[in-house]
Amino acid sequence: MTERETEAAIRFGILGCATIARKVSRAIRLAPNARLVGVASRTLEKARRFASENGFPEDAHVYGSYEELLQDPEVDAVYIPLPTSLHRRWVAEAARSGKHVLVEKPVALNAGELQEMLAICEEKGVQFMDGTMWMHHPRTAKMREIISDASLFGNVKWVDSAFSFTGNDDFLENDIRVKPDLDALGALGDAGWYCIRSILWAADYELPKTVTATRGSVSRNPAGVLLSCGSSLQWDDGRVATFHCSFDANLTMNLTVAGSRGTLILHDFIVPFQENSSKFSLSSNTRLAEMALGWHPFPVEHHVHTDLPQEACMVSEFARLVRSIKDSGSKPDQRWPDITKKTQLVIDAVIASIDKGFETVSL
Amino acid sequence: MTERETEAAIRFGILGCATIARKVSRAIRLAPNARLVGVASRTLEKARRFASENGFPEDAHVYGSYEELLQDPEVDAVYIPLPTSLHRRWVAEAARSGKHVLVEKPVALNAGELQEMLAICEEKGVQFMDGTMWMHHPRTAKMREIISDASLFGNVKWVDSAFSFTGNDDFLENDIRVKPDLDALGALGDAGWYCIRSILWAADYELPKTVTATRGSVSRNPAGVLLSCGSSLQWDDGRVATFHCSFDANLTMNLTVAGSRGTLILHDFIVPFQENSSKFSLSSNTRLAEMALGWHPFPVEHHVHTDLPQEACMVSEFARLVRSIKDSGSKPDQRWPDITKKTQLVIDAVIASIDKGFETVSL
């Protein structure tokens, strides 16, 4: 790395040693415009171990408290992998310390909390972005091109998205995602977040008019945390979307976007089967063949290669926005916070619909 | 064909010259235990043309009315591709004439009508089967094996099924499937029938407890016929299923069955992309790889070859059941009529839920 590149690189600190922080610390190391400079934990020992196990540079800082990291002037930006219930506090403290904020999803317990976080980031002029990695895969950009192409795809008519995985006994007993005081949104926050995001993505971020949770889709653990749920989303122009998320079925990550002329399908939209090579299927202007003996044309697999894994693309995009603020003194980009907000509004609507016995809720 | 095989073959007549009858007449020619002996239309000329254009044998009979075909003692069984609103009359007349009945889907306008048809078939001792072809593809049997395997698949948790195709202007104006006096169930009968069947198949034919049509999924033509709709289905044990069907999105035929240990996915469940070779994808005991950088193991594509296309398998299965009745004087098999009945009950429940403003309807 040249000196100029090193100077241009955004310096990241990590607030906490969650499992997902291993993946993101690697992503920070891989992103060409980012530099991994430190990690904080509630004990110095844990921070030291995390740094040494995750390839931090020799000169990385380790801190025995989150506050210390936030006070370090050599940190430009923080990545916050803490449980959702701690985001409100630490996003605010990071912003007040002038640190740009990349925060894990689900971002907030509700839209009110999120609004507080976004307001303080805006006030302090720091960039906000949530950690929804798949948004930054070049495959996603390629798919956007396709669904925007009227002759290939027409208009979006319906979307279906699903994310399930089987939580084992340890997960269902001990994971933060089943704890009401840590990640109270359970499967909806952890898995449904992605489904909702994919639906909003397909709808070009137009919020649905109404949301109706799916009767029979909801299960909870004894503490009341959602282990599964689903919902349908409705737009005034007739578009409709459905999703299902759960901790009780084998790993499944389906996204189907059906347009008047095309159908886009993939089965690994959140985490690609493989890091560097990914694919999706596109059917376009498809008919049944003569006498309905088959299809014409067959769906086509599109392959998208990426040298940088999607989480490094995410870090890189975030660092680019931070760089631009630092260089030009401009205001933070509002596109990513807006998308976070819309995702959270739908989350809230799903919860409201479930709480009202699967009534339809307006947004 | 030896004389013995010829004698054993069930002799089929076709009641009407619908487009789908071209595919099924070919299937009757292909099925080793079936013989195509005639076709009836409302005019002799149409019947003659159909026979000559569809490879009927030289000595095939042609009839200028459905009654004449039903009176022919050389016909064992009829295939009825007529519009749904005519099924009630012609299934009954066929049964009264002692003809076994293979009838196109959707079978009836409602479960009451279907019950009449099934009762008369039972009374007259004739076999009844509906024309849901994909049930008879060897791929379907292979998939059944897999979802029944507890170590590979676990228990079914959720199912999603979709069937859309884009009706062109001519279809939306003139096709029988958009005419309230011919196929009044519209997209639900034509496309949703398959989705509901696939869900029942995945549920091992256990009827759901409740059905809730999807708000926002419904569109109708000016005559009130459904052009799109969707629904969720609920079982007491927590299983849930969703489907969407429409005439307004590019050809899409998705089926996902998610179990506690496995996920089965295919995108051509109704009509395979290709006649003789088909596939489905199975993920089993799938986890994210170390650091969630990919999947382990990858989903596996299972390929199933069939020499006979699925519609010929259907004819062959139907002919086998008819043969058994003729040979042993046994009663008709009740399995297929039962599956038809369950499909129709769910259709009725979806209609009821739509009519009640997307209320949940008990079965």
Image (cartoon, coloured by chain):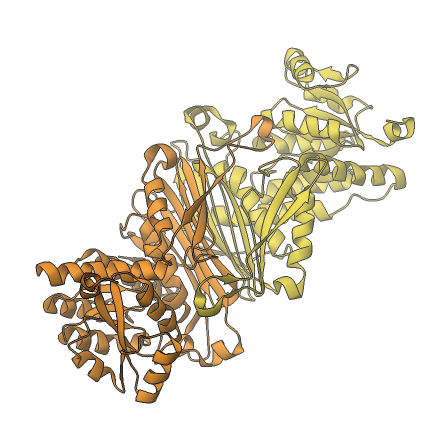
Chain colours: A yellow, B orange
Q: Tell me where residue B210 appears, x and y as whole percent.
A: 31, 54
Name the quadrant of the C terminus of chain B.
bottom left
Q: Tell me where residue A190 appears, x and y as whole percent.
A: 53, 37
Q: Residue at x 64, y 54 (%)?
A: A205
Say left or right for A213 vs B125: right
Q: Residue at x 25, y 65 (%)?
A: B34
Is B338 drawn above or below residue A247 in the view shown? below
For the residue pair A107 and A51, the one nearer the viewer reads as A51
Say left or right for A239 vs A67: left
Query: How many marks overall?
Result: 0
Name the quadrant of the N terminus of chain B.
bottom left
Q: Tell me where residue B283 appears, x and y as whole percent.
A: 46, 38
For the residue pair A288 and A180, the one nearer the viewer reads as A288
Is B146 drawn above or below residue B45 in the view shown? above
Residue A355 visible in the current orientation: no
Q: Quadrant of residue A50?
A: top right
Q: Tell me where residue B73 appears, x and y as whole percent.
A: 15, 77
Say left or right for A58 vs B295: right
Is A77 drawn above or below residue A263 in the view shown? above
Is A91 drawn above or below residue A209 in the view shown? above
For the residue pair B356 and A118, the one nearer the viewer reads as B356
For the residue pair B257 and B66, the one nearer the viewer reads as B66
Q: In the displayed image of the protein, which residue is found farthest to the front?
A: B2
Q: Quadrant of residue A264?
A: bottom right
Q: Residue at x 44, y 45 (%)?
A: B303
Q: Residue at x 33, y 48 (%)?
A: B141
